[in-house]
Amino acid sequence: MANIHATFTVERSYSHAPEMVFAAFTNSEKMRRWFADGDHHDVLVFVHDFRVGGAQNLKYRFNASTQFSGVELSNDGAYEDIVANERVVITSTMTFGDKRISVSLITLEIVPAANGTTLTCTNQSVYFDGADGPEMRKMGWQSLLDKLALELEK
C-alpha cells in the first residue's frame, strides 16, 4: 500500500473575540480540556510548551469503551510559528501502538469576524501504511474544534 498525501480544511465560527480563541491555545489547562481529555481514553502524557520551538506532546491509552482498548496513541509535535491572536503552526508525528502512522503540518488561522472569530484549521499530512487516513483525521479535528467551542463557553 502506498503512502497517502492529503490536505483538508476545517472552519469554525465562534462568538468570541480572537483574543479569547487564541487564549484557549496558550493556557495549558484550557488546552488539555478541549484538546487532550476525552471519554474514550486515559491521558498518559500531556506536554504543552506554547512557544516557537516548544513541544506539544500527547499520549493516551484507549479504554474499554473502544475497539482499541489498551492501545496507546502518541502525538509528538512542535510549535513552528505563533502570532498572537492570529496564527499557530504545528508539526506533528502520530504513532498508534508501536507504528508511526502520519506526519502533519497544521496551520490554525484566527481571523476577526463580524460576530466574533473564524478559525480555519488546514491540515497537510502524509499517512503511512495502515494509518487512519484523511477522513478520520478530519473528523477528529472537527470534534476537537467543537470541544473548543464548549471550552470557550466556560
Image (cartoon, helix red, strand yellow):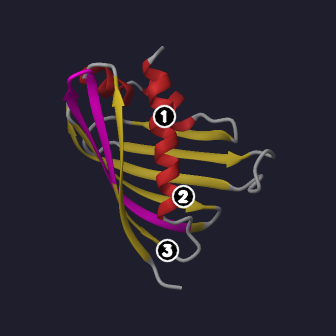
* x then y, percent, for residue 10: 37, 47
What amino acid does circle 2 point to?
Answer: Met
**Labelled disc at residue 128:** 3
Q: Earlier in the sequence, mark 2 or mark 1?
A: 2
Question: Which image quadrant is residue 21 in?
Answer: top left
Asked if residue 81 is positioned above or below residue 138 in the image, the reply reads above
Of residues 106 and 93, the one drawn nearer to the viewer in this rendering: 106
**Labelled disc at residue 98:** none
Q: Residue furthest front?
A: 114
Q: Residue placed at 65% from the left, 62% from the top?
A: 97
Of residues 55 and 133, the one drawn nearer to the viewer in this rendering: 133
Q: Is residue 146 left or right of residue 43?
A: left
Asked if residue 126 is positioned above or below residue 9 in the image, the reply reads below
The residue where tag 1 is placed is: 146
Q: Residue furthest bottom?
A: 1
Magenta segment's dominant SS is: strand
Q: Earlier in the sequence, mark 3 or mark 1?
A: 3
Q: Earlier in the sequence, mark 3 or mark 2?
A: 3
Q: Residue furthest top?
A: 154
Question: Rounded to the nearest whole Å, what is the CA distance between mark 3 and mark 2?
Answer: 14 Å
The residue segment tinted magenta is 100-122
Of residues 118 and 78, the one drawn nearer to the viewer in this rendering: 118
Q: Is residue 6 left or right of residue 61?
A: left
Question: Rounded to the nearest whole Å, what is the CA distance between mark 3 and mark 1?
Answer: 27 Å
Q: Residue placed at 30% from the left, 36% from the top?
A: 119
What amino acid does circle 3 point to?
Answer: Phe
At mark 2, the secondary structure is: helix
Instruction: Assess disc 2: are there few (<14), some (14-19) or many (≥20) residues with their C-alpha within 10 Å of its C-alpha.
Output: few
Q: Residue placed at 50% from the left, 24% from the top?
A: 150
* x then y, percent, for residue 6: 38, 67
